[in-house]
Amino acid sequence: MLELIDITKKYKQTKAVKNMNMYIEKGEIVGLLGPNGAGKSTAISILSSLLEPTSGDVKFRNKSMIKNPKSLRQIIGIVPQEIALYEDLSAEENMKFFGRIYRLKGEKLKNKISEVLEQIGLADRRKDVVKTFSGGMKRRLNIGVAMLHDPEILIMDEPTVGIDPQSRNYILQTVKRLNKERQMTVLYTSHYMEEVEYLCDRIYIMDKGNLIASGTKDEIKQILASENTIYLKADYWNESFITKLQEKPQIHQMKVEGNEIVLVVSKDVAIFSKLAHLAEETSVQLRAVDVKQVTLEDVFLHLTGRALRD
Amino acid sequence: MIFQMIKKQYLQFLRNPVEIVLLIGLPIILITILGNALGNLIDGGEIDLTFKLAIIEHEDEEIQVENFLTELENGDLPDEIIAAFAAVTDSLAPVEMFKEVLRSEELNDMIIVEEAHAREMDAIKADDSYAAILEFPENFSADLLENILLDEKMNPEAIIHYKAGSEIAGNIVEQIVAMYQEEFTLGTFLGNNGIDPQQLQQKGAEITQEVSSVSPHEPLSAKAYYTIGMIVMNVLFMATTIAQYAFRERQSHIFNRMIIADFSRWVYFIGILLTALIFAWIQAILVFIFAYFAFDVTWPDLTAFLVITFFFTLAVGGLAVLLTAISFRSNSEQIISFFSGVVVTIFAFLGGSFFPSGTGSFLGKLGDYTPNGAAMSAYLSILRGESITDNADHLIFIACFAIGAIIIGVISYPKRGAAS
Ligand SMILES: Nc1ncnc2c1ncn2[C@@H]1O[C@H](COP(=O)(O)OP(=O)(O)OP(=O)(O)O)[C@@H](O)[C@H]1O
Ligand SMILES: [Mg+2]
């Protein structure tokens, strides 16, 4: 339904997006994942016709949207990464303003505002000025404003940044419900793995302007199908244990985090006895050895050699 | 759509009383301060420009003229010339004639002349009731006559002592002296050539007329002057205020929402234009209404007043569009703060908001090429009882300014809003 075709976007010095391809089908929730500066916001700005790409094409129902994005603009809703609201206006006044610019009016607008305020749980604060809202409430209103005109596609840029877990769950559930009940198509951008894992059917992973993986959750996890993630715990590590670990060819990735070590190892290697042996040899007291399910976080670590939120 | 933009701006103003105080309270405070403090400078009638002038002659003029004639007789000039001079002795008294000029009807409500003796010099200098002292040095009249009639080189000078704070009075005396000297020389010359000495008296009268036009004689109170000066200056801040709101709207990505809603940029521009125009209009009218009640600034021709206000606020709207477009393009607020911090002050200075620059002067002419200066000239002219058609040139300039600002704004507007 909506696609990016070989999109590149150059700012003066930086290439924010490089040769990116992406598509969204009706009724899907698609995740776009990547660390700070990956190019997520740039990509969705292009997708939503806010920004012209340096090269490449944006197609909506097989028509290019670069020159004439009107048909696209009518059916998308955008939740910007920033709180794009008038702080001096009340929740209701904000909604009225944005509803009016979508040419909604009269009873219809009134009903819609009440409905959305109910959905985002702000009905009792409708008369209050946004300035007086908590961060989470502003986030929710930021989302609500984008839903007034019943968009077919909702594009959300990190809608849960900096809010408490409750508000966050509320938002995630709302998105899921909208998708289920109204077949709303959603593009959800985040750098929280858990959110994307919970919400999305398909996922794109970006880093430094490049798309480094894409597919369904399972497909992406397959990237690590031949590998396991092992967590080691001890009171302390010593130099020689770590050096010797690094020398082992079966260990593809390793990360030391305080008294925990995360290893990505080939699957069918009898690694446990080797680890135990090595610990004994270097007199390290292992407290726990744990094998975990592969997560998207691991995939990201695998693909980039970095954790997502480094 | 445009109505929504205006309404949301209204709500934002409503919730920012500080902004309202700055836009409306500030001009009122400034009018009060400037009207009182600088009133003396421009008020012709009420707050007075009347001042006391002391004239000190170091030597009696009659004696000097006699001595001059005696010297002539002893000299080697032909007798008939000497006789001709002697015949016009009456008109050969330059200081006396000058005093008569000062006492003439045209000047005597402005200048109170008091003759004093050289001994009293120090006392007069210390006396604050005197604004200036005009001192004729010893032998002044004789030297002057020699200079004029015999082409001797010596050019005696009267000395004008200004009192601190009375520079204007000093200036006026200086101008009168300069003009008188010129006319006296010419008059004597004519008399010398057998033209009726009566001519001299008439010349004297003419001089005084010219002199009186030197003094600012407008039927305007200082408060009226500064009401207009401060309004045309402060209404410019409405343009920067609206541009600032627009820029913040873009910074906070609200503008992106508008783009996504397919809000055309033309509608946006017209929205900015009308928002600035309407609020500038309200701002100006509120202060004018205040001035009407508090300072008695009344308009003889209300339609003309409203037309000028409309044109001026249209220019303010154009400025808002221009500032918005440039700030969007440069992606920074700098142009707006530069305009409100520097340009407004320069415009206000040139336009005559702080002091009258005089219609004929270079500054005055330059000031008419600022929107506020042109509006101010038009307002003043209406207040003086002139008609709107006398101000067509000002209105045309303001309209051109508005249109020019809008066009440059539209041209410099970036094609698509940046996302970042
Ligand atoms: N307007 C701009 N001018 C210049 N460079 C920009 C601009 N906007 C973004 N960039 C650069 O492009 C790159 C990608 O930025 P982008 O905002 O798309 O990342 P992101 O994935 O959304 O990051 P985050 O998670 O922090 O929101 C960054 O290096 C950024 O510095
Ligand atoms: Mg971003």
Image (tube, coloured by chain):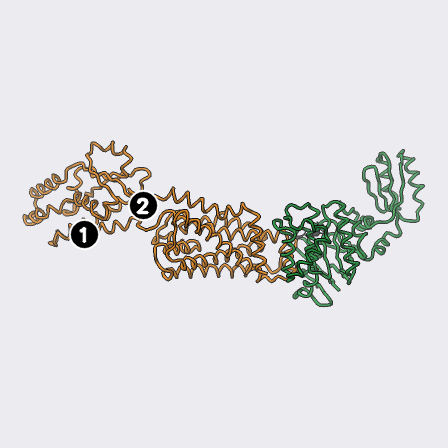
Chain colours: A green, B orange
Along the viewing direction, whichever of A111 and A152 lies nearer the viewer: A111
Left or right, B107 with reference to A79: left
Vertical arrangement, residue B178 with respect to residue A60, above or below: above
Along the viewing direction, whichever of B315 and B78 lies nearer the viewer: B315
Residue B208: image location, x then y, percent: 22, 49
Q: Chain of mark 1?
A: B
Q: Secondary structure at mark 1?
A: helix
Kind of residue indicated by mark 1: Lys
Residue A126 visible in the snapshot: yes
Q: Which residue is mark 2?
A: B46
Residue A169: image location, x then y, percent: 77, 49
**Residue A152 picture quarter:** bottom right
Vertical arrangement, residue B172 with respect to residue B281, above or below: above
Residue B419: image location, x then y, percent: 65, 55
Check the image and name the residue furthest to the left. B79
Marks 2,1: beta carbons within 8 A = no
Left or right, B300 with reference to A57: left
Along the viewing direction, whichever of B243 and A9 lies nearer the viewer: B243
Along the viewing direction, whichever of B100 and B200 lies nearer the viewer: B100
Q: Which residue is mark 1?
A: B203
Q: Chain of mark 2?
A: B
Comparing labels 2 and 1, the label whose residue is closer to the camera = 2
**Residue B312 picture quarter:** bottom left
Q: Secondary structure at mark 2?
A: loop
Kind of residue indicated by mark 2: Glu
Residue B177 visible in the snapshot: no
The quadrant of the rendering that contains the N terminus of chain B is bottom right
For marks 2 and 1, the one nearer the N-term is 2
